[in-house]
Image (tube, helix red, strand yellow):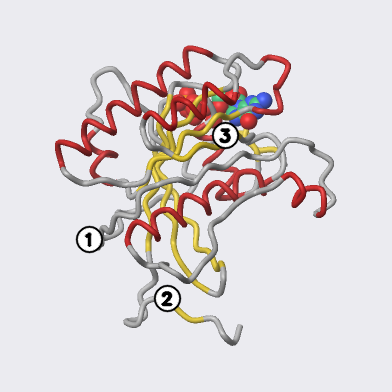
Amino acid sequence: MSGRKPFQKNGTIPEYNIALVGQLGVGKSALTVKYITRRFIMEYDPDIEDTYTKHEWVDNMEFAVHVMDTCDKPDSDSTRYLRWADAFMVVYSITDRSSFEAARRYLDLISQYQKASQREVPVALVGNKIELERYRQISKADGTGLASEYDASFFETTAAEDYEFVEEIFHAVVHEIQRHRGERQGIFQPLFISEERFQIAGRSRPKSPKISLEKKDDKNPSKKNPTSFKLFNKSFKIFN
Ligand SMILES: Nc1nc2c(ncn2[C@@H]2O[C@H](COP(=O)(O)OP(=O)(O)OP(=O)(O)O)[C@@H](O)[C@H]2O)c(=O)[nH]1
């Protein structure tokens, strides 16, 4: 398509590593697969950790997003994703208080690592499964409160409904990484998803992902090499 050009002058495209962390069963794999394939998975092998790549064109820019769907085990070493990530999505289920407490522990872990390594990257707290509103245990106020304690962005979403609910969050996180690296200063408007936008788009769902983007504008010029990636080398059931 004419007019499309790589963002960087040397022809390489920017790459963004996003690690999803959170308690077992909160929907990390579902969110990852939804973003990568636009589909919702119902069953997934919980013991597999993998990294997926998606190439995107947004605002006339090409970039690659690498998503690590982490799987922590009691004896596993978290530095594998702490070192790798350019941003974290700390996921909990709005229907499960224990997953919210686990999210706090992950935020703590990330915060301690960042202090020790003196490498700060954006963090987003993500409350998943919002279509299960009747089972909600964690209020939005609880979510925003926890996010602000750790200077994280806050989102609520669902992997089980429209792809856009998930895509917007990944794009917002990419946007945060870009701001953090100083790639997009003054070029792009802050991303915000409003209720009106979903109504205009003809969506019936009354609740859209909530976004709060109030991050520091630190620069991190370091650019890492991409790791190797595998795509869907595991079995799971997928549903549209
Ligand atoms: N209703 C609903 N179910 C979801 C949503 N996201 C995930 N699930 C379901 O929750 C269960 C766990 O989802 P996973 O994506 O495997 O969760 P995970 O965090 O990757 O869990 P592990 O792989 O075990 O670490 C599955 O049955 C999913 O279908 C959601 O947004 N809404």
Q: Is residue 218 above or below residue 239?
A: below
- Distance Cα–Cα, label 2 vs label 3: 35 Å
Q: Residue at (57%, 42%) from the top-left corner?
A: 211
Q: Quadrant of ligand 1?
A: top right
Ligand 1 is within 8 Å of the C-beta of the residue at disc 1: no
Q: Is residue 57 above or below residue 135?
A: below
All told, the count of numbered labels is: 3
Which one is closest to the eye, mark 1 or mark 3? 1
Instruction: Indicate the secondary structure of the residue bearing disc 1.
Output: loop
User: In this figure, which residue is indicated by the disc labeled 2?
Assistant: 7
Q: Amino acid at mark 2?
A: Phe
| Relative image position of residue 105 (x, y in whole percent) | 34, 21
Question: In the depicted view, which residue is nearer to us: 112 or 185?
Answer: 185
Q: Which mark is residue 222?
A: 1
Question: In the depicted view, which residue is nearer to us: 3 or 236?
Answer: 3
Q: Dot 3: few (<14), some (14–19), or many (≥20) neighbours within 10 Å?
A: few
Q: Quadrant of residue 1?
A: bottom right
Q: Amino acid at mark 3?
A: Phe
Q: Which mark is residue 21?
A: none
User: In this figure, which residue is indicated by the disc labeled 3?
Assistant: 236
Q: Residue at (57%, 85%) from the top-left corner?
A: 3
Q: Dot 2: few (<14), some (14–19), or many (≥20) neighbours within 10 Å?
A: some
Label 2 near label 1: C-beta < 8 Å? no
